[in-house]
Image: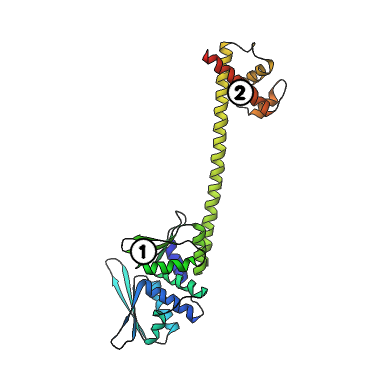
Amino acid sequence: MSFSGKIKEELAQHYAKARHCNLAELSALVHMSGSFEKDGYGSCILKLHTENDGVARKCFTLLGKTFNISTDIAIRRNTAKGSCSYYIRAKGEELLAVENVIVQAVCCKRAYIRGAFIASGSMSDPDKSYHFEIVCGTLKQAEYLRNMINSFEMDAKIVKRKKSYVVYLKEGSQIVDVLNIMEAHVALLELENVRIMKEMRNTVNRKVNCETANINKTVSASVRQMEDIIYIRDNIGFDKLPDGLKDVALTRLKYPDATLKELGGLLENPIGKSGVNHRLRKLSEIAEKLREQ
């Protein structure tokens, strides 16, 4: 099962205790996957069509929990695709409460976002990337949902995709927050584990890359120093060099892989790292002058 499927399965089994939260979640489900109509007598008719059995089950259960009205559900199987379509229909004046629900309380906002995600949301596999989205049919609907998500100090954005409008989040920490808002706590823990492992891998890679770069830099410097010292030896010899420079040159030739600190300890008269570095620069300057001549 995909990560999106796991989240929806978890959320489909979560039911709020308060009636007003159930109304908010049911309203989101219908807004995303259904519609409200009126019959000839002015009664409200709720219609919902989905290919997701979790959405159908959640909608059917919420209607049963919230209203004492008859609900019809029809299932059509597509043998060619191996899928099912679920059609839910309910009728009653009580359903006006769902159509006209005003979502203001924090708990109701959580329920509405949860219902919207179950109906038309998705999330990428966190091992590959961080992307959370809910597809809306109209710009007005998308703006309403975006503002609701952002009321939790998030930064959801909208992008148009063909004829739909997508409310999305791309930052890992904000996706963790929205899972917490929807109360998908199992999925949240799984995502956090993935994020921790990713961060550990990135930290290790950064350290390895840094150490590799330092090694390459040290090796390059050592090769350059050896070239300068050999050039001096082959052109004027070491006897014309001051004793300190001669000592460093001979020691570097003998120990080409030694670090500056190690090199300083190997000299006839040991000196520190900065002193070795200073003498090697002097040797490099002498080699450059010889090359110019």
Q: Residue 72 occupies which quadrant of the picture?
A: bottom left
Quadrant the N terminus occupies: bottom left
Mark 1 Cα-neighbour bin, 10 Å: few <14, some 14–19, many ≥20: many
Q: Residue furthest right?
A: 269
> From what the image shows, is residue 260 above or below residue 20?
above
Q: Residue furthest bottom?
A: 41
- Where is residue 175? Give x, y as percent: 49, 61
Report the front residue among 232 and 105.
105
The number of numbered discs placed on residues in the rendered structure image is 2
Say which amino acid is labelled 1: Tyr
> From what the image shows, is residue 96 above or below residue 82?
below
Q: Residue at x 52, y 15 (%)?
A: 292
> From what the image shows, is residue 53 above or below residue 244?
below
> Can you identify the residue that label 2 sits on?
281
- Where is residue 11? Give x, y as percent: 46, 70
Q: Residue at x 64, y 18 (%)?
A: 250
Q: Residue 102 occupies which quadrant of the picture?
A: bottom left
Horizontal side of 38 relative to 108 (left or right) equals: left
Q: Residue at x 45, y 65 (%)?
A: 6
Of helix, strand and loop, which one carries label 1?
A: strand
Q: Residue at x 56, y 39 (%)?
A: 210
Horizontal side of 124 relative to 197 (left or right) equals: left
Of helix, strand and loop, which one carries label 2?
A: helix
Horizontal side of 6 relative to 266 (left or right) equals: left
Report the front residue among 63 and 78.
63
Q: Which mark is residue 165?
A: 1
Say which amino acid is labelled 2: Arg
- Where is residue 35? Give x, y as percent: 34, 76
Mark 2 Cα-neighbour bin, 10 Å: few <14, some 14–19, many ≥20: some
Q: Which mark is residue 19?
A: none
